[in-house]
Image (cartoon, rainbow, N blue to C red):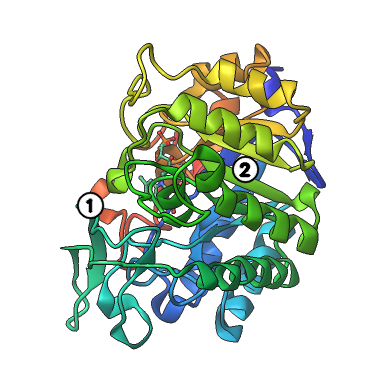
Amino acid sequence: MNKLFEPAQIGDIAVRNRIVMAPLTRNRSPGAIPNDLNVEYYRQRATAGLIITEATAITHQGQGYADVPGLYKKEALDGWKRVTDAVHAGGGKIVVQMWHVGRISHTTLQPNGGSPVSSTNKVARAKTYLVNADGTGSFAETSKPRALETSEIPGIIDDYRKAARAAIDAGFDGVEIHGANGYLLDQFLRDGINDRTDYYGGSIENRARFTFEVVDAVTREIGAGRTAIRISPVTPSGESYDSDPRKLFTHVVEGLARHDLAYIHVIEGETGGERGYTQGTNPPFDYKDLRQAYERAGGHASWMVNNGYDHQMAMDAVESGRADLVAFGKPFIANPDLVERLQKNLSLNTPDNATFYGGGAKGYIDYPRLEKVA
Ligand SMILES: Cc1cc2nc3c(=O)[nH]c(=O)nc-3n(C[C@H](O)[C@H](O)[C@H](O)COP(=O)(O)O)c2cc1C
């Protein structure tokens, strides 16, 4: 049997295979509250070794798209408890992706219609997803952000800590800090966005400070073995550019090596796009070097890879030891029973991207299951 299908220990979390469901925003939790549809969706996918939930706002301020779930109110946590119970009943494990979108938001989604917050007051040329009064969805330009005061940052770090505690109380096996894809932490990391002059801006050490302080606070609260982080060293989402991503992310992983984290989740190339995409440096970003830098610094968390993996690539990555875990995104949307399909080497359903965001059961829980296909 290929190692991809073998059990593993990821920090404090024992998983029955190394196939991970990547975080996938689906915009089906009005009021930030997971509902019956979400319970069924995650229950269907419980055979994954590990499910990472869709990105979930740590606070109302951290929300940037319509109908995404949250971790900041009782009804939402009660909804998540039903999800975690369903996944555990199916023998699966589930962590929540903790999200603060920073400037990738819209005033209509913010508390009291305020400005989104960021490392900067420069607007991102990026789109967010809104649901109109008549229930139809549409994409809109993000709103101009307000640069956070230095004195506000400890409060946001504490929001991450509280959200992590709430997640564990709601039955999650751990949390994944969303440090990827141009959201708040990435907005601090990158010199193409961060134009601060305080000790959260300027040098790489200063730009990485916020991420490290969040990791410190979360690991102190729930333990490093239940804490993970996702990074996307070269993804340009939300205009996240850096002049030297190699140097920046070497520093990031060296800092992360201070904790015995559950896993480091690395998106290789442009999220959802070219695996060979790179920025800032020439030659292309080297993920093997990144892992070596992490291990040289004493890190030994599991190494999770993502982006455009198929069956063979995933088996090769794990069998060769290049990765410990492989996260699949789009394949899990259309194949709730992806693990069984890969195990039996069966064909996969193709997801319909028109159904990715919002709406009812269509393209969400209504894909043909294995028992129904020949
Ligand atoms: C519909 C959709 C929603 C996504 N939502 C998230 C998200 O909430 N958080 C995140 O980190 N990445 C998100 N991503 C990126 C995926 O996790 C993954 O990195 C990407 O799809 C590439 O993996 P794949 O080739 O296996 O699909 C999303 C992707 C898609 C297609």
Q: Residue at x 53, y 54 (%)?
A: 199
**Numbered tag placed on residue 3 in the rendering:** none
Quadrant assignment for the C terminus: top left
Q: Is residue 283 left or right of residue 320?
A: left
Relative depth, front residue between 243 and 142:
243
Q: Is residue 284 left or right of residue 207?
A: left
Callout 1 crowding tier (Cα within 10 Å): few <14, some 14–19, many ≥20: few
**Above or below for 92 versus 100:** above
Residue found farthest to the front: 197
Residue found farthest to the bottom: 112
Q: Residue at x 72, y 23 (%)?
A: 295
Callout 2 crowding tier (Cα within 10 Å): few <14, some 14–19, many ≥20: many
Q: Quadrant of ligand 1?
A: top left
Instruction: Name the residue carrying label 1.
Output: 354
Q: Residue at x 67, y 67 (%)?
A: 161
Mark 2 vs ligand 1: CB below 8 Å: no
- Residue 309 seen: no
How many labels sit on residues? 2
Instruction: Name the residue carrying label 2.
Output: 48
Dot 2 and dot 1 residues touching (CB under 8 Å): no
In percent of width and height, residue 127 lies at: 22, 57
Dot 1 falls on a residue whose secondary structure is helix
Residue 358 occupies which quadrant of the picture? bottom left
In percent of width and height, residue 255 lies at: 67, 38
Whole-angstrom CA distance, mark 2 to mark 1, is 24 Å
